[in-house]
Image: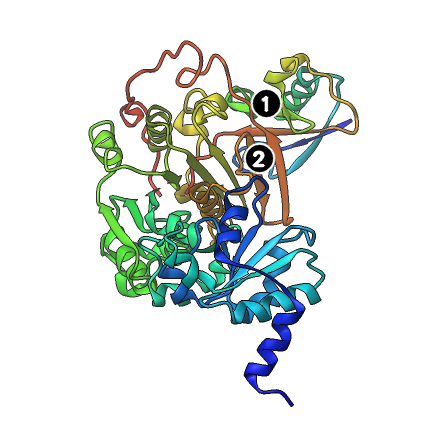
């Protein structure tokens, strides 16, 4: 049986060590090793070696392969004074890492010599770390991604069938600011699918009911409510509040064309979703990188050819599927990860449970995003066609 | 015979049919056959995009795009519901 001191000494003899001076040379050299910080979260937040990766000692075995998959990559392990990282270095060698050294004297010695230090600014609060822990565990999100989400501003067109699940998931994910445009009040016929609202919110403006539900779910989220219908008169004012992504869950063509044109002119990615009876579709219109709504449908169809959900009906769960797909796309766009549905239209048939994808291409003759645009100001189609509003 | 998928907004014109078999070697032939049987579709098809093998016919040969028997033709009109 060894004491802690003896055990530390025995372990130290089995690993390689560098002092802070040598570590700095490695840090500045070409092919710099991975600097691995094995301290606790609070210690990391107080300052760490810039560019280092952080895995608390207790998580080392389970997370190292994800963070450093290449076992031949040189690693410099460090903690505060070099003791915990001694055991970490030994563990890494046992896991097959071939070139691991311990930073003797730890970051304390590194700091004493005035070497570079990074102190994270505006990190997550302890409660946020718990709330978003399942995001923090995903390498593609992590703390950096979660902070990005908390700083993101996403505008939802409509707090109805599609807007409900989209808003709930975006709020739960910690999107910092959600703008919601909807002029309507909650109606009994909405409750079969519009899960932001409840029987208690009947006759209340949808934006108010939505804001209450969102705050109850996640107080981190600021809701900017616009209780108005989007028109050529207010679109510039609303967009000038600054949005990273727009989620289109409108229930009528005039709004959809208005939003498309605005998104192109303001260069904001637009996550499109639409539903009817058992079928829905989703895509992402990323201005100038992929097609826009008018590349697909240059002009709205006459109202007699475009029945709304109020006329044709819709399966209540369908917007749950399509609106959730929209939330997924919006989160990916905000994080800058994955492959968004740009140039691809995903169709979902709830009756057969099938997804079908078709390719969408930019139209060089598109009246809005084409080479010689013919539409250069907002059009209020509402004056020409007036479909029944859902 | 090739399969033409009828979108939900056009099914009132096909007696509720979700898929219709039609005869022809090009998109034009198939749509002519379809309209011959369901004349109510004629005007609405002007507002629908047509996909063969998952590609928009506007990026291929338009209405002259050849359609093999194994191809599925998808009609896609704009849908506003939300």
Residue at position x 65%, y 90% from top?
A1
Tag nearer the camera, 2 or 1: 2
Are there few (<14), some (14-19), or many (20+) residues within 10 Å of tag 1?
A: few
Q: Disc 2 to disc 1, how far (Cα)?
A: 16 Å
Find residue A77 and report its horizontal and vertical position in percent: 55, 60
Evaluate if marks 2 and 1 touch, with contact meaning CB atoms under 8 Å apart.
Answer: no
Using the image, name the chain to which the residue with label 2 belongs.
Answer: B
Are there few (<14), some (14-19), or many (20+) residues within 10 Å of tag 2?
A: many
Mark 1 element type = helix
The outermost residue toward the bottom is: A1
Find residue A105 and report its horizontal and vertical position in percent: 47, 65
Quadrant in the rendering for residue A385: top left
The C terminus of chain A, quarter of image? top left
Instruction: Please name the residue that numbered disc 2 is placed on.
Output: B7
Using the image, name the chain to which the residue with label 1 belongs.
Answer: B
Residue at position x 53%, y 37% from top?
A341
Q: Is residue B10 above or below residue A67?
A: above
Residue at position x 32%, y 27% from top?
A266
The outermost residue toward the top is: A372
Counting labels gives 2
Find residue A200 and report its horizontal and vertical position in percent: 27, 65
Instruction: Please name the residue that numbered disc 1 is placed on.
Output: B39
- The disc label shown at residue A269, or none: none
Can residue A185 be seen in this snapshot?
Answer: no
Residue A23 falls left or right of residue A268: right
Mark 2 element type = loop
**Residue in the foreground of this view, choosing between A56 and A154:** A56
Residue A240 falls left or right of residue A16: left
Of the residues under marks 2 and 1, which one precedes in the sequence? 2
**Residue in the foreground of this view, choosing between A220 and A54:** A54
């Amino acid at each position: 049986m060894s004491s802690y001191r003896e055990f530390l000494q025995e372990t130290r003899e089995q690993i390689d060590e560098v002092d802070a001076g040598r570590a700095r040379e490695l840090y500045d050299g070409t092919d710099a090793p991975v600097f691995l910080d094995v301290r606790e979260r609070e210690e990391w937040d107080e300052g760490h070696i810039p560019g280092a990766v952080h895995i608390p000692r207790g998580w080392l075995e389970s997370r190292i392969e994800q963070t450093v998959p290449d076992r031949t990559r040189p690693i410099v392990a460090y903690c505060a004074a070099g003791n915990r990282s001694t055991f970490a270095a030994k563990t890494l060698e046992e896991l097959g890492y071939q070139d691991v050294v311990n930073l003797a004297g730890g970051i304390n010695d590194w700091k004493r010599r005035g070497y570079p230090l990074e102190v994270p600014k505006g990190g997550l609060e302890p409660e946020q770390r718990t709330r978003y822990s399942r995001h923090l565990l995903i390498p593609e999100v992590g703390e950096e991604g979660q902070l990005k989400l908390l700083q993101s501003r996403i505008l939802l067109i409509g707090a109805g069938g599609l807007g409900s699940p989209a808003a709930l998931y975006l709020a739960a994910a910690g999107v910092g600011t959600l703008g919601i445009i909807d002029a309507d009040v909650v109606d009994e016929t909405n409750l079969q699918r519009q899960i932001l609202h409840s029987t208690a919110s009947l006759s209340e403006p949808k934006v108010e009911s939505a804001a209450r539900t969102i705050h109850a779910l996640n107080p981190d989220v600021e809701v900017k409510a616009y209780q108005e219908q989007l028109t050529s008169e207010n679109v510039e004012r609303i967009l000038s509040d600054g949005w990273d992504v727009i989620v289109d869950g409108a229930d009528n063509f005039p709004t959809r064309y208005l939003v498309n044109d605005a998104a192109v002119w303001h260069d904001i990615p637009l996550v499109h979703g639409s539903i009817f009876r058992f079928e829905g579709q989703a895509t992402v219109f990323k201005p100038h990188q992929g097609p826009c709504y008018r590349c697909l449908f240059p002009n709205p169809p006459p109202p007699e050819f475009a029945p709304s959900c109020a006329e044709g009906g819709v399966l209540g769960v369908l917007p749950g599927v399509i609106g959730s797909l929209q939330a997924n796309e919006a989160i990916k766009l905000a994080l800058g990860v994955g492959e968004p549905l740009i140039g691809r239209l995903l169709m979902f048939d709830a009756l057969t449970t099938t997804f079908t994808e078709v390719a969408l291409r930019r139209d060089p003759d598109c009246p809005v995003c084409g080479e010689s645009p013919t539409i250069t100001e907002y059009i209020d189609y509402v004056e020409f066609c007036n479909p029944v509003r859902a | 015979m090739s399969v033409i998928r009828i979108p939900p907004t056009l099914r009132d014109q096909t007696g509720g049919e979700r898929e219709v078999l039609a005869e022809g070697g090009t998109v034009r032939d198939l749509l002519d056959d379809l309209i011959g049987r369901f004349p109510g579709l004629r005007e609405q098809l002007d507002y629908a995009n047509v996909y063969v093998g998952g590609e928009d016919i506007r990026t291929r040969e338009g209405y002259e795009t050849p359609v093999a028997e194994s191809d599925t033709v998808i009609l896609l009109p704009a849908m506003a519901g939300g």
